[in-house]
């Protein structure tokens, strides 16, 4: 999958970026930019690439006096003024925009971009199917995306960065000690060099968990009011609640937790309601509880993710005291099965 923005869009995006940062940019031009940006995801991606490039250029300028002098010259700064602007903030929008013009988009988005400023395009992935999907990253890492999972990938010469927007993903990271592999969600970041782990974001986006199957990962939170760092070993799961500002390290069977990534659902004393949540991720015909009494009933077994729902229900009925009712083309309801002599 290759979502690299085409050159003409990148050029247009660079022109818009510099124009939007000009002091005489008008509201009409802002409206025209919004119309251009609404042209499709390719336009959004092209503009994001330019913003990322400008940000990296600004960071480079802040730490490289040679580039500061070059940019000051391009902006028409006098020699005398250069001697008094050593504290100039090169992160400002005017200097970032000027830097984009000065170095040229050909530098950013052709052969020299990664060697000079380590700028790489962003790739977007979204699993809209009802089965898990596997993607192969350019570094040799493998990512399994569960149903409804969305993420972005940026591979550069210095780092491998993943932003998980929603859903659940299992990562098999190719070892590369020179390029840390990180997965982030908001202020939470998981960093690994070569390992296998899962990150699972709750549907409400307020909680997430990190489960380590192999290797080692460091999980950090960079929020100023709630900064922390945890290092996991295989078989541990870090459960994070961002609303309550709580975290807990649990001992789990990583093979069970991450079994979905193999195409199977493994349950080992799993409460029925949790098992149904897993089964229903991949099923067109959903299974729901008609009696809450059944919710905590433990079940064990291996099931094919996305397998025949009726077969799954028949297996349950063989080991649990339940009766079933088909309430529509896409729903089966489970009820407790009572002894007719006592009820």
Image: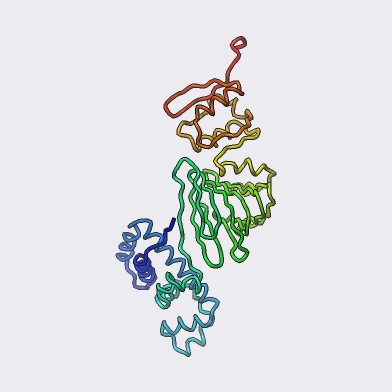
User: Residue 27's quadrant in the figure?
Assistant: bottom left
Q: Position of residue 210 (x, y in %)?
A: 61, 49
Quarter that holds the N terminus: bottom left
Q: Position of residue 80 (x, y in %)?
A: 48, 90
Task: Locate residue 274 relative to residue 216 in the image: left or right.
Answer: left
> Which of these two is toward me, 17 or 193?
193
Question: What's the residue at 48%, 31% (across, down)?
Answer: 286
Task: Locate residue 212 relative to residue 50 in the image: left or right.
Answer: right
Quarter that holds the C terminus: top right
How many marks overall? 0
Identify the image's colour scheme: rainbow, by chain, secondary structure or one colour: rainbow
Question: What's the residue at 49%, 75% (across, down)?
Answer: 90
- Furthest residue in direction bottom, as rendered: 80
Residue 246 in view: no
Q: Position of residue 172 (x, y in %)?
A: 59, 53
Question: What's the residue at 31%, 66% (across, down)?
Answer: 29
> Which of these two is toward me, 258 or 337?
258
User: Residue 228's quadrant in the figure?
Assistant: bottom right
Task: Locate residue 18 relative to residue 266 in the image: left or right.
Answer: left
Question: What's the residue at 46%, 31% (across, down)?
Answer: 285
- From this view, report whether residue 142 is shown above or below residue 269: below
């Amino acid at each position: 999958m290759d979502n690299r923005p085409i050159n003409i869009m990148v050029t247009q995006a660079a022109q818009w970026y510099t124009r939007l940062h000009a002091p005489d940019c008008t509201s009409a031009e802002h409206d025209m930019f919004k119309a251009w940006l609404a042209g499709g995801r390719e336009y959004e991606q092209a503009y994001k690439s330019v913003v990322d490039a400008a940000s990296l250029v600004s960071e480079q300028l802040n730490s490289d006096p040679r580039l500061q002098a070059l940019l000051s010259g391009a902006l028409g700064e006098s020699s005398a003024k250069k001697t008094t602007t050593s504290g100039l903030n090169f992160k400002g929008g005017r200097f970032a925009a000027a830097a984009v013009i000065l170095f040229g988009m050909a530098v950013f988005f052709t052969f020299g971009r990664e060697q000079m400023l380590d700028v790489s395009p962003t790739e977007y992935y979204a699993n809209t199917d009802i089965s898990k999907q596997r993607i192969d990253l350019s570094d040799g890492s493998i990512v399994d995306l569960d149903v409804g999972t969305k993420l972005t990938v940026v591979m550069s010469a210095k780092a491998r960065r993943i932003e998980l927007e929603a859903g659940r993903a299992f990562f098999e990271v190719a070892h590369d000690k020179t390029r840390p592999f990180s997965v982030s969600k908001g202020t939470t970041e998981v960093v690994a060099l070569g390992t296998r782990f899962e990150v699972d974001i709750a549907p409400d986006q307020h909680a997430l968990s990190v489960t380590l199957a192999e290797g080692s990962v460091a999980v950090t939170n960079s929020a100023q009011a709630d900064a922390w760092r945890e290092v996991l070993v295989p078989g541990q799961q870090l459960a994070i609640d961002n609303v309550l500002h709580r975290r807990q390290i649990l001992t789990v069977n990583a093979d069970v937790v991450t079994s979905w990534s193999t195409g199977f659902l493994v349950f080992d004393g799993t409460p029925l309601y949790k098992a149904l949540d897993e089964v229903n991720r991949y099923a067109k015909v959903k299974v729901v509880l008609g009696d809450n009494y059944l919710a905590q009933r433990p079940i064990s077994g291996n099931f094919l993710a996305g397998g025949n729902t009726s077969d799954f229900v028949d297996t349950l009925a063989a080991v649990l005291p339940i009766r079933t009712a088909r309430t529509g083309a896409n729903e089966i309801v489970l009820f407790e099965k009572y002894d007719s002599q006592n009820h």
